[in-house]
Amino acid sequence: MHLHDITQPAQGAYTTLADLMALRFPAKQLSITRKSRALSVLAGPNKSNFRARGIDFEEVRNYQPGDDIRTIDWRVTARTGQAHTKLFREERERPVLIVVDQRTGMFFGSSHCFKSVVAAQLAALLGWSALDNGERVGGLVFNEEQHREIRPRRSRKNVLALLSETDHYNHALPLAPDHNAMSFADILSNLRRIARPGSSVFMISDFTGAESPQAREHLFQLAQHTEITAVACSDPMEHELPRAGRYAVTDGNSRSELSTADRAVRQRYSQHRLERDELLAHDLQRLGIPLIQAQTNQSAFSTLQQYYGESRR
């Protein structure tokens, strides 16, 4: 992959750390802390229970009409015989956590680049933009064998650590099949452990495995206390098989031949993908989580620019 025109799709099967570092300059044109109308539309009518920039406890006072009943302090209420509610002060800042999927399923692309490369570029743009906006940046990079946590800090060194780990995981692809592989639910469980209430979480993945009951429950719990934005990476061939013919495909180790001559097979393939995408969109919208679509035939910068590229205040 070599960066030239940032409005053009990336190229290649692997990242380079130099390219991810160079994205610091176009990232200055993005402001991920602002909430655009386009992003609000993606979140749908449902709102999560996420409250402001944090839930640091401040004091207890008498309950007043209009207070959220979920903040009632039942111990004080029982002791005094009068309803009391907890007050929380808003944090002046919030950590930004960037979750980057580098599983073997991301090692796929049909023309320009692989999903794993798009994910890395998106992570770089989001990380640099967050730092430029004065936020503390950390993250979680994972594959099916392991994960690496980077605790949020407001430093260039921390963003570089995140990008270095992403590049390292990227170059480990493809991984050999592992029957004891971590599930998407396992990753969300790890994320719940490190994500502080009030954090802004960007999840960059193809979301394979997000439909499992365990993953749904973890995502529900995360959405209660953090502000999540989902960025789903895909390739055009995952949505629709190419026209009838025989095509050579490879996973980097071996080659096979794909036949798309059967029209019914192509239709079932497209329908199955459509149903999967609709299920993911429904689950996320129910939690008030905006879903940004990123494809390998589109520029990562242009994808984010649609939602974060307007002039700053």
Image: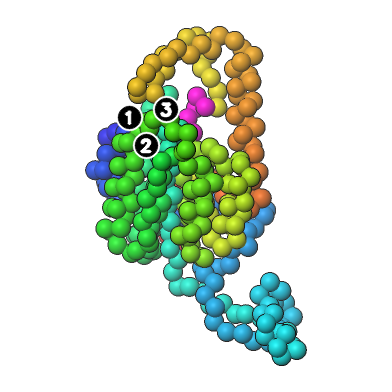
Looking at the image, residue 216 sits to the left or right of residue 158; the answer is right
The residue pinned by badge 2 equals 117
Quarter of the rendering occupied by the N terminus: top left
Residue 246 drawn above or below residue 150: above
Residue at the image position 37 percent from the left and 42 percent from the top: 120
Q: Earlier in the sequence, mark 3 or mark 2?
A: 3
Residue 115: within the magenta? no
Amino acid at the residue labelled 3: Gly
Is residue 110 shown above or below 312?
A: above
- Mark 3, Cα crowd under 10 Å, few <14 / some 14-19 / many 20+, is many
The disc placed on residue 109 is 3
Q: Are marks 3 and 2 in contact (CB under 8 Å)?
A: yes
Q: Position of residue 102 (x, y in %)?
A: 40, 40
- Specify whether 133 is left or right of 1: right
Q: Which residues are magenta?
A: 232-238
Q: Nearer the viewer, residue 53 or 310?
A: 53
Amino acid type of the residue tagged 2 in the rendering? Val
Q: Nearer the viewer, residue 224 or 266?
A: 224
Question: Can see residue 270?
Answer: yes
Which mark sits nearer the N-terminus, 1 or 3? 1
Q: Which residue is mark 1?
A: 12
Disc 1 and disc 2 in contact, CB within 8 angstroms = yes
224 sits to left or right of 302: right
Disc 1 secondary structure class: loop
